[in-house]
Image (cartoon, rainbow, N blue to C red):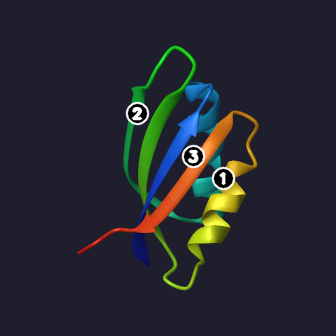
Amino acid sequence: MNRVVINVVTSDLGDSVSRVLADVQRFGWALNEIAASASSADTAEFKLAVSAPSDIQLAHIEDRLARHPTVAAVQARWASG
C-alpha cells in the first residue's frame, strides 16, 4: 500500500465527504488524514490522504470519486516520501 493524496472540490462539503469516505471504506483503503475548508459561498475543498494499493491507477481513483453528484473536481497524486 502506498499513500495517495486526493484533493476534492465540491458544491456540498457534507455530502461529498460522506460519499467519498464511504468509497474509501468500501475499497479497503486506510484513511490517514482529512482536512476541509470553504473556498467561497458556492464551493468547498477537502484533502484526503489514504493508503491504497501501489498498482492502482490514479485516473481510476479520480474517475470513481468524481461520479458523485456534488463533486466538481478530483485530483489524485502519489504522496512524496
Q: Nearer the viewer, residue 9 or 61?
A: 9
Q: Nearer the viewer, mark 3 or mark 2?
A: 2
Secondary element type, mark 2? strand
* Number of the label disc, if any, that sits on residue 36: 2
Secondary element type, mark 1? helix
Disc on the earlier residue, 3 or 1: 3
Vertical relation: 26 (above or below) 22 = below
Mark 1 — residue? Answer: 65
The amino acid at mark 2 is Ala
The amino acid at mark 1 is Leu
* Number of the label disc, if any, that sits on residue 21: 3
Question: Residue at the spot x=54%, y=38% of the render?
Answer: 9
Residues packed near mark 1 inside 10 Å, few (<14), some (14 to 19) or many (20 plus): many
Quadrant placement of the C terminus: bottom left
Disc on the earlier residue, 3 or 2: 3
Question: Residue at the spot x=45%, y=39% of the render?
Answer: 46
Disc on the earlier residue, 2 or 1: 2
